[in-house]
Amino acid sequence: MVFFSSAEVYGDYEGVMTEDVMEKNPIKDTYQMNDYAITKWAGELMCLNSAKMFGTETVRVRPVNCYGPGEHYTPYRGFIPKFIYHALSNKPYVVYKGHKRIIDYVEDTCRTFANIVDNFILGEVYNVGGRPEWEKEIKEYSDLILKEVGGNDSIVTYMEAEPFTTKVKTIDCSKAVRDLRHDPKVTPEEGIKRTVEWMKSIYTNINI
C-alpha cells in the first residue's frame, strides 16, 4: 500500500524538513497546526501500527504542493488553482505575506509515485516536492499567475502571515531522489503557464 500523507505533518518545524523529523522530535504545539495535518499524521501512525500488528506492507509519501492540469477549482484547493481561478474571473483573493512554498508539477510528482512500484521499500517514507531552488514567497507565485493571465494585483489583498499555517516549508527530497529517481523537470514558470492554459479551456464561461 502507498499511503498519501502530507508535508503539513511537519507543522512549523524550524529547519530543513527531513523525513526523520517526526521520529527524532517530540510532538508539540507547533506540529500539526490544523485539522488536516492532524489527520495526516494520525493516518501515518495507523500505518506504522498496522505494520507492527499485522505485517502490513506500506510506503508513506509526503507530497508538497502538487499542482497542475486536472485540479478543478473549489474554495478548498491549494493556492495555485485558487489564485488562477480568481485571476481568470477577475475576482479578489488574499495573499498572505511571509509564507514560502516549493511547488511540484503533477507530472513530476506522479512519475515519482509510479516509481514506488518497482522500488518498494517496506516502511519507508518520502518527501516529494519541487527543487529547492524553486522555493518562493507565495506572493511571487501570485505575481507569476497574474503575469500569465494578463492581470494585475488590484484584485489582491495582502495580509500578514496566516495563523495556524506553516510559514516556510524547506523540504529535503534527497531520499526520493536516491530511491525513486525523483527528478522534477517542470519549472514553476512553465507549470503555471500550462495550468493557466488548462483552466482557461475548462472554465470557458469565465470572462477572460
Image: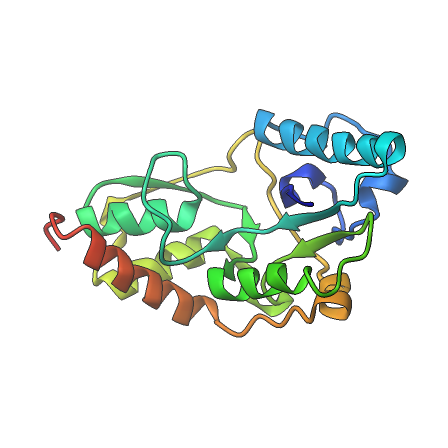
Q: Nearer the viewer, residue 6 or 131?
A: 6
Q: Which residue is farthest front?
A: 54
Residue at 33% in and 37% down? 74
101 in relation to 197, above or below: above
Residue 81, position in %: x, y?
36, 49
In this rendering, the count of numbered labels is 0
Residue at 84% in and 37% down? 51
Residue 4, position in %: x, y?
62, 43
* Image quadrant assignment for residue 78: top left
Quarter of the picture containing the N terminus is top right
Residue at 28% in and 65% down? 148
- Say left or right for 111 vs 107: right
Residue at 76% in and 35% down? 47
Q: Nearer the viewer, residue 43 or 186?
A: 43
102 in relation to 163, above or below: below
41 in relation to 86, above or below: above
- Rendering colour mode: rainbow
- Say left or right for 55 vs 108: right
- Say left or right for 160 vs 86: right
* Image quadrant assignment for residue 57: top right
Q: Residue 13: tell me if it is visible.
A: yes
Residue 56, position in %: x, y?
80, 39
Quarter of the picture containing the C terminus is bottom left
Residue 186, position in %: x, y?
48, 72
Q: Residue 30: tell me if it is visible.
A: no
